[in-house]
Image (tube, rainbow, N blue to C red):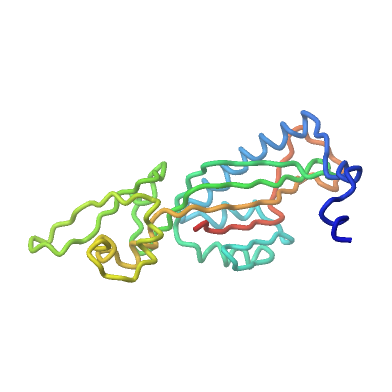
């Protein structure tokens, strides 16, 4: 029994493959690029986020945001309203058509960097940056008598250790000058996976480049 589990019949592996047409691949690629661009541009407009994102979801849609689940338009709207103003930088988009669906459902995986901003500190300049570099410059208060401020360039690779370290040794003095709000405002890596369904699915209508809405949306921070 064990050997059968670990060494399955090679003939059965043919069921795990699917030959996609060039049309399906083209639809998946174009739809994923257009979707991700429109979705995150809408997401990053704090004043208009909810009305702009509403058309992406349906009543049957579900959202899991870093472990917190929402089902349906109302719950998803409430969940998204609790997310602070944001700025996303997309690093990679992967799109895979799902076998047995026509127009093909798409499994879209987006990897990127996001920065969330305390709404009380939100300014037009804060959220208008077009990109988030791996090395970010933070202005942190110092204890100098003159009350001046100094800019520290903090490598993204050391943000997590700094935020997690509760010690007060000399090597972590940079961390001592960072309050909780500053730490939460630093860039974080995220992965978001969407299952997209064509608006025409089940209608019998054919569209060379169908529009898509979200069936399932799963967002999580990495690290």
Residue 60: image quadrant is bottom right
Residue 30: image quadrant is top right
> Which residue is painted at 71% across and 37% down in the image?
28
Residue 104 is situated, as x and y percent measured from the top left of the image, at: 79, 42
Q: For this rendering, which residue is in front, 106 or 152?
A: 152
> Which residue is painted at 34% across and 68% down in the image?
180
> Which residue is painted at 35% across and 46% down in the image?
135
Q: Check the image and name the residue furthest to the left.
A: 145
Q: For this rendering, which residue is in front, 211 or 93?
A: 93
Q: How many marks?
A: 0
Above or below: residue 65 compared with residue 166: above
Residue 32 is situated, as x and y percent measured from the top left of the image, at: 65, 40
Residue 7 is situated, as x and y percent measured from the top left of the image, at: 84, 51
Quarter placement of the N terminus: bottom right
Residue 117 is situated, as x and y percent measured from the top left of the image, at: 39, 58
The reply, left or right, for residue 115 in relation to residue 5 is: left
Residue 129: image quadrant is top left
> Which residue is painted at 34% across and 71% down in the image?
166
Q: Check the image and name the residue furthest to the front.
A: 3
């Amino acid at each position: 029994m064990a050997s059968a589990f670990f060494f399955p019949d090679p003939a059965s592996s043919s069921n795990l493959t699917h030959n996609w047409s060039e049309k399906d691949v083209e639809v998946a690629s174009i739809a994923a690029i257009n979707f991700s661009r429109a979705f995150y541009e809408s997401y990053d407009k704090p004043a208009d986020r909810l009305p702009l994102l509403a058309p992406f979801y349906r009543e049957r849609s579900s959202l899991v945001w870093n472990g917190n689940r929402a089902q349906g338009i109302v719950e998803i709207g409430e969940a998204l309203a609790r997310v602070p103003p944001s700025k996303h930088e997309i690093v990679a988009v992967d799109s895979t058509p799902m076998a047995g669906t026509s127009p093909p459902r798409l499994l879209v995986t987006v990897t990127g960097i996001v920065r969330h901003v305390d709404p009380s500190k939100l300014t037009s300049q804060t959220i208008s940056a077009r990109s988030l570099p791996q090395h970010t410059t933070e202005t942190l208060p110092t204890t100098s008598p003159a009350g001046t401020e100094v800019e520290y360039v903090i490598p993204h690779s050391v943000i997590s250790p700094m935020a997690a370290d509760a010690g007060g040794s000399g090597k972590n003095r940079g961390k001592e000058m960072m309050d909780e709000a500053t730490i939460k405002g630093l860039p974080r890596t995220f992965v978001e996976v969407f299952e997209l369904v064509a608006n025409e699915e089940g209608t019998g209508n054919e569209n060379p480049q169908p529009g898509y809405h979200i069936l399932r949306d799963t967002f999580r921070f990495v690290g």
